[in-house]
Image: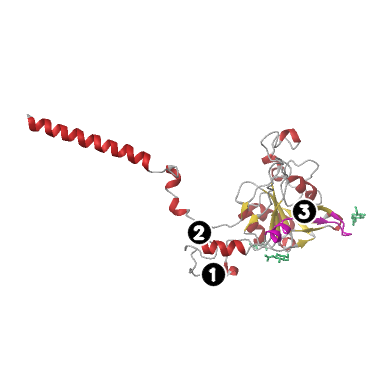
Amino acid sequence: MITKFILIGAGVAVAIAFGLGIIIGHFAIKKTTSSTTGKYDYLTRDADQQNYQTFISSMQSTNIEANLKVTLTNGSGSIIIQTSGTEQVYDTTQPKKVNLFLAYTPNGTVSSTKLYYGNYGQLEDIQRLASIVGNASLQGSIIIMRYGKIFRGDKIMHAQYYGAVGAILYNDPIDYAPYGTSADQVYDQKWYMPPSGTQLGTTYTSNGDPLTPIYPSTEYMYRIDEEEVSAIPKIPAQAIGYSEAQVILQYLQGDNVPTYWSGTLPSVVYRYGGILRNLAKIEV
Ligand SMILES: *[C@@H]1O[C@H](CO)[C@@H](O)[C@H](O)[C@H]1NC(C)=O
Ligand SMILES: *[C@@H]1O[C@H](CO)[C@@H](O)[C@H](O)[C@H]1NC(C)=O
Ligand SMILES: *[C@@H]1O[C@H](CO)[C@@H](O)[C@H](O)[C@H]1NC(C)=O
């Protein structure tokens, strides 16, 4: 009988100690991440610090900012529009402005007297465009495409595949400001895309460091030549606001596109494009 009580007593003591341990452990361990992100920490740990510093110090922000514009000039060289390269700032207490930078697009300026409209930039869209205007016409052209349906990097790759030298991306109001583009229907009155707004992000169509495909980007890792990277566009591409796209699209010539290719920008007749109106030239 006494042994039984001692055993039960010991059992209770162990249970209490165990319970206390869990409680102490629970409060002693600092929770830095939620349980879902914790699982992936090993995938997202900081990059090699030395690599990172070398990379950051090699970037010239002023060079990049100067490269974020699209310019349309007419036959006499007068500027019809030069895009701002930034989004409108709504909160003037914030010193930050958003530069319209598409990561991994190459530095450089290209220009053309031919501008085409490539719908959503899906492969079948550019194929259709090519079948209508002819493959040869797309060589050396610039293609403007609307966001939506597929990844932005693939749109640029498709334009490049068909011989374009530059690409322009914008958010058409049909998908991003469905109740119209007047000030009371878009940000900051509603949550829809305002005229200067545009989608931004990477154009890299793979994962990780493009120079060390499949392998980690550590300092001593073998790196392939930049020319060998195939998952990054080789043509410059620029995102612009739809108020700017509106001016540019008005300079398109060529046949009207079918309804399912059309957007809802006011005063724009959506066309396939070709040689720009008024002998204009477009520069990206
Ligand atoms: C270009 O624009 C300027 C200024 O608006 C105008 O005087 C000129 O005639 C235009 N040239 C062409 C070819 O349209
Ligand atoms: C980017 O290209 C411009 C000319 O288009 C050139 O002046 C500039 O030095 C280049 N910047 C870099 C970082 O290569
Ligand atoms: C047009 O160009 C594409 C991409 O380069 C190619 O796959 C296709 O065969 C070409 N079509 C014609 C009719 O030349």
What residue appears at the point 55 percent right and 61 percent down from the top-left corner?
52
Tell me where residue 268 sits by quadrant: top right
Q: Read off the magenta span.
A: 61-79
Q: Is residue 270 visible?
A: no
Q: Position of residue 186 (x, y in %)?
A: 71, 36
The amino acid beneath tag 1 is Ile
Name the secondary structure under disc 2.
loop
Q: Position of residue 256 (x, y in %)?
A: 77, 47
The amino acid beneath tag 2 is Ala
Residue 273 is tagged as 3
Quadrant of ligand 2 in image: bottom right
Of the pair 211 and 178, the residue shown nearer to us: 211
In this view, 97 is above or below 103: above
Q: In front: mark 1 or mark 2?
A: 2
Position of the N terminus, as image quadrant, is top left
- Disc 2 designates what residue? 47
For label 2, the crowd category at 10 Å Cα-Cα, with few meaning under 14, some 14 to 19 and many 20 or more, is few
Tell me where residue 232 sits by quadrant: bottom right
Of the two numbered discs 3 and 1 on the same chain, state the one appearing first in sequence.
1
Of the pair 259 and 144, the residue shown nearer to us: 144
Q: Is residue 23 visible?
A: yes
- Disc 1 designates what residue? 224
Inter-mark Cα distance, 3 to 1: 38 Å
Residue 54 lies within the magenta run: no
For label 3, the crowd category at 10 Å Cα-Cα, with few meaning under 14, some 14 to 19 and many 20 or more, is many
What residue appears at the point 77 percent right and 53 percent down from the top-left corner?
273
Check the image and name the residue furthest to the top: 1
Q: Position of residue 168 (x, y in %)?
A: 71, 54
